[in-house]
Image (tube, rainbow, N blue to C red):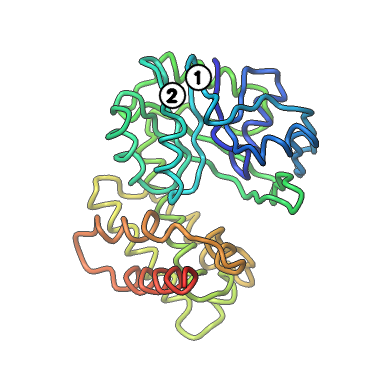
Amino acid sequence: MKILVVGAGAIGGYFGARVLQQQRDVTFLVRPKRAAILAEHGLIVKSPAGDVTLPSPPTVTADKLGGGYDLILLSCKAYDLDSAMTDIAPAVGPGTAILPMLNGMRHLTMLEERFGAGAVLGGLAGIATTLGEAGEVIHLAPYAEMKFGERDGSISPRVEAFAADCTGCGFDFTASPRIMQDMWEKWVLLASIAGSTSLMRAPLGAINAAPGGTEFLAGIMAECSSVAAAAGHPPGEAHLGRLRGMLEAKGSRATASMFRDILRGAAVEAEHVIGDMIARATGPVPLLRTVFTHLMAYSAERVR
């Protein structure tokens, strides 16, 4: 496949580098400043799975972007989605598949409205990465996983083709016949962990050790799960068991990228991850509403 990776940041940079490392046809859509850095220093990945430096990876800027791409891997932050859709528009042809790696569900509607439902796959990434001061991709933990599939549950030729390109690239991947369920389960996990650690400004273990902390974590997981169930995607018992184990782990230093974004004064995906879940709730979700108020207050103060 001819693959366009939008950005060469923490997520797109990691997965794109691993696929490009296996000599697949990958081009990174980047800003001019990032293109200059990649041209001079290469795409650098520092990872427990093995470091790699890819000299002068193929890049293109939005003003020079053309068509002919089979798949667009979209891994921007939710608050950058509008500009990303404008940037990728010249690359989207009748047969182009868009594979978003964003959290939540709101982006699916936005992409459908712009490019049509048939162009949009379901997908998710499970990885902890960040960008270093020199622009290198830093992989923070050994795991790296990608799931993708048609939203109707079929395994189409384009899904099979992308799975073939992922083979041997050094990360786990699944061409999933239940990608919508996978995405809802990840959203429940993310909203529970991001919401709680961002509100409490502490890792999960510290929240557990605080008076009422264990009950708070159980409550926010229950609220998120109830929203998923109302949407027809109740989290499976195995998934809930794993999430419960993460939330209850004594001494855990686990946080979420949203919490780390707050610590460095960055923008957060409050409306996409928490606000949209509240909008889909059919019952009371007081803990999520408290989290959302907190995040929006932070966002307002950050802008001010």
Give the distance between the C-alpha atoms of the residues marked 1 and 2, in whole angstroms: 6 Å
Q: Is residue 238 shown to the viewer in this render?
A: no
Q: Amino acid at mark 2?
A: Pro
Label ID, residue 90:
2
The residue positioned 47% from the left and 26% from the top of the image is: 175
| Above or below, comparing residue 62 to residue 264 in the picture | above
Q: Is residue 194 shown to the viewer in this render?
A: yes
Position of the N terminus by quadrant = top right
| Image position, residue 298 (x, y; %) | 46, 72
Q: As drawn, which residue projects farthest toward the front?
A: 63
Which of these two is toward me, 77 or 277?
77
The residue positioned 55% from the left and 62% from the top of the image is: 266
Q: Earlier in the sequence, mark 1 or mark 2?
A: 1
- Circle 1/circle 2 CB separation < 8 Å: yes
Q: As drawn, which residue projects farthest toward the bottom?
A: 211
Which of these two is toward me, 27 or 246?
27
Q: Residues within 10 Å of mark 2 (few under 14, many from 20)?
A: some
